[in-house]
Image: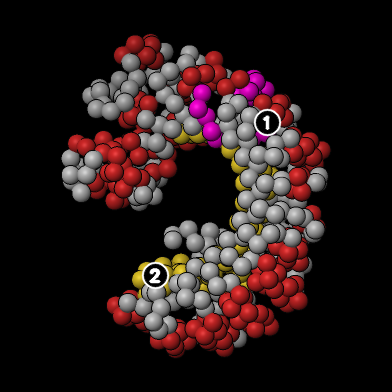
Amino acid sequence: MLKLNKDILYLIFEELKNDKNTLYSCLTVNKIWCEIIVLILWKNPWKYLNHGKEKLLFNVITSHISAESKSDLNSKGIHFMMTRYRRPFFEYINLCKHLNLCEINRIIENIYSLQEAYKISNIKNVILNLLINENARFTYLYIPREFDYQIHLIPGAKRCFSQLEFLQCNTSINTNVIIGLTEICNTVRKLDLFVEKFDNNHEIFRLIGTLKKLYNVCFLTDIDIDEPFCKTLEYSLIKHSNTIQYFKITKQPTTNMLSTFKNLRWLELDDKFRQMKWDCLVNLSLPYLQVLKSRSVPNNALASLIENTNGLLTEIIIDFTDFTFDDDINNSRLIRAIYKNCPILEYLLLDFNINNILEMETLLMNCRYLIGLGIICFEQDLMAWDKIFEILTKYAPNSLFQFKFISHFDCKLESFKSFFDNWKNRKPMLLKIHDMHFTEKYFNLIDTYIKYGKIKNFHYDKSSTFFEAFEWF
């Protein structure tokens, strides 16, 4: 591996971009490895930021500040950067692709919380003018609430943001900031918007209108929202309906917006307040839909949506059903909609119970390309998991080997043992357990089957946070 050329090494280390410990351990191997890994780590240094370690990152950033800027700050009574740091080996700040102004604000305010407001303002000005320059090329920009700095006026800003692809901001953003963004952000393809309760700025519609090819939108709202503003916002997004392929929303639209997204590949519906019926999904046709994720959306609405797809769905994640709207009939209808309309399905997370257990058999027999299956079962009946495991060992397609099991209630140790024993002549499973109470006996049992080669990887999480069903595979 030491003799591989830099391009190959980069591709290898890029695969480890979510494993910071391994990347850190490789930094000291040699100069070439160090150069490659620094490139990867500094694309988005905020991603690897550990709580309590903010000042270390800040010291690296401020080590790039010129002597002239330090002297100017010193003349204003700001002495925090007078410590001498050796000029860094790399131009770290110009390696950044993510400019996270939210994190920068947080770090500065945490470190210098006792400073006067004007001093903190001067510190922010120096840092922004350092980061935004003609040699930097940011592709991701995160803007905090109540941000009022006109970054477009910084020398080199237009060139610095000429390749911008992602913008995250709220809709109460300062007017002058929006006007500035409109001038430099027309290349944005992915937009994350949070709609505020009050004081939403209508200039945001003009910003959206200037975007040339918007394909990914995250539309987040609070429980109390400005309905007229949201409606106008939806109409501004409809103008991009031909290009939008990825869409996330946390409220039922008030317009026919979703029906205009005919090229949609990915849809995520997250009703965290569990207040809506989502009847907009009934008779909604999204022929090219490949990924569907939902949280607290009624089963009957989801079933109708799936019934009107064209069989291209490969991943369905249905999390935390709200039983205010649903019953066993709608749950069974949803399962039937999946196995009748999703022949190439690869990943599925869904609620199963005693009353729809037979539907699970049919699903496993029809969806023969399943790779990962997440089962949510909140039945108190201790026999429920016995029946689930029995069906899995009898009917699971050969492709299925990734499992996630979620339950508030315990599963018998003997049930797990029987399931593992019956997993014969199959690919070793990747297994995640959420929310069940595990004792040492359970962990010992798992270790035994890892040694036998029936379980390749195991993860246990006592929490019930499992929306990203197959994120580790």
Tell me the number on the disc at residue 53.
none
Q: Which residues are magenta?
A: 162-182
In the rendered image of this protein, does residue 184 appear above or below residue 44?
above
In front of the other: 119 or 309: 309
Look at the image and say whether residue 202 sits in the magenta stretch: no
Query: Would residue 201 appear left or right of 159 to someone viewing this image?
Result: right
Q: Quadrant of residue 209?
A: top right
Dot 2 or dot 1: first in sequence order is: 1
Residue at 62% of width from left, 40% of height from top? 215
In the rendered image of this protein, does residue 415 appear above or below residue 45?
below
Q: Write down the residue under mark 1.
A: 208
Residue at 51% of width from left, 24% of height from top? 161
Which secondary structure, mark 2? Answer: strand
> Residue 227: x percent and y percent?
80, 41
In front of the other: 349 or 155: 349
Residue at 28% of width from left, 28% of height from top? 90
> Residue 26: x percent and y percent?
24, 46
